[in-house]
Amino acid sequence: MAAVPVADEPSDDLAEAISPLAALDDQALWRVARDRLPTDTAEQLQSLDQKRQREGLTEAEEQEAAALLQQYERLMLVRAHAVALLKQRGHDVSSLLTAA
């Protein structure tokens, strides 16, 4: 597996996703911080990962898996940013850090 390059700054797409968070009130940030990938999306991603390990994926399946993984990574970045903002605002976010 190739190493993923780490950027100093988020891509324009990711910056666009996290920039509005600072303007949200605390209640809205808590909702964002608790957001989850839809169950069907998570199941599809897991299914494709298992198939990849068992027998490999077709090009179309690889593209689908990549798109789903990008969706998951974007969600995680937005959640992490919301948690960081809540912590900066003085909230105890420990329950979010231990949640699955």
Image (cartoon, rainbow, N blue to C red):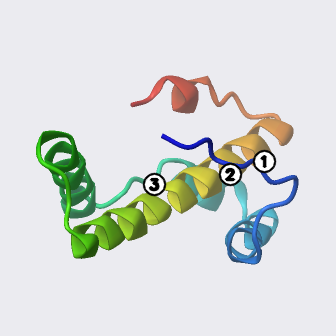
Q: Is residue 15 or residue 57 the one in the foreground?
A: 57
> Disc number at residue 60?
none
82, 51: nearer the viewer: 51
Assign a secondary structure to mark 3.
loop
Which amino acid, by three-letter code, is at mark 2?
Ala
**Residue nearest the observer in this picture, 30 or 8:** 8
Task: Look at 71% across and 50% down and name the residue there.
Answer: 81
In terms of sequence position, does the residue under pointer 3 or pointer 1 come before the other? 3
Q: Which mark is residue 85?
A: 1
- x, y percent for residue 57: 20, 59
**Would you call the spot at circle 3 few (<14 residues within 10 Å), some (14-19), or many (20 or more)?**
few
Report the side of 43 relative to 90 (left or right): left
| Res 50 quadrant in image | top left
Disc 3 target residue: 35
Q: Is residue 27 left or right of residue 95?
A: right
Residue 54, relative to residue 82: is it above or below?
A: above
- Amino acid type assigned to the residue bearing label 1 in the image: Leu
Which residue lies under the disc numbered 2? 82
Q: How many marks?
A: 3
Q: Is residue 94 left or right of residue 98?
A: right
Instruction: Look at the numbered disc 1 and give the secondary structure of its residue.
Output: helix
Instruction: Please name the residue shown 26% across and 55% down the image.
Output: 45
How far, Cα to Cα, is label 1 from label 2? 5 Å
The structure residue drawn at horizontal position 70% and vertical position 54%, both measured from the top left corner, is 26
Alpha carbon of mark 2 to alpha carbon of mark 3: how far?
Answer: 10 Å
Write the residue at 56% across / 61% down: 74
Q: Which label's residue is closer to the chain start, 2 or 3?
A: 3
Asked if the residue at tag 2 contacts the one at tag 1, i.e. Cβ–Cβ closer than 8 Å, the answer is yes
Camera-side residue: 65 or 34? 65
Residue 8 in percent (x, y) is at: 87, 52
Q: Residues within 10 Å of mark 2 (few under 14, many from 20)?
A: many
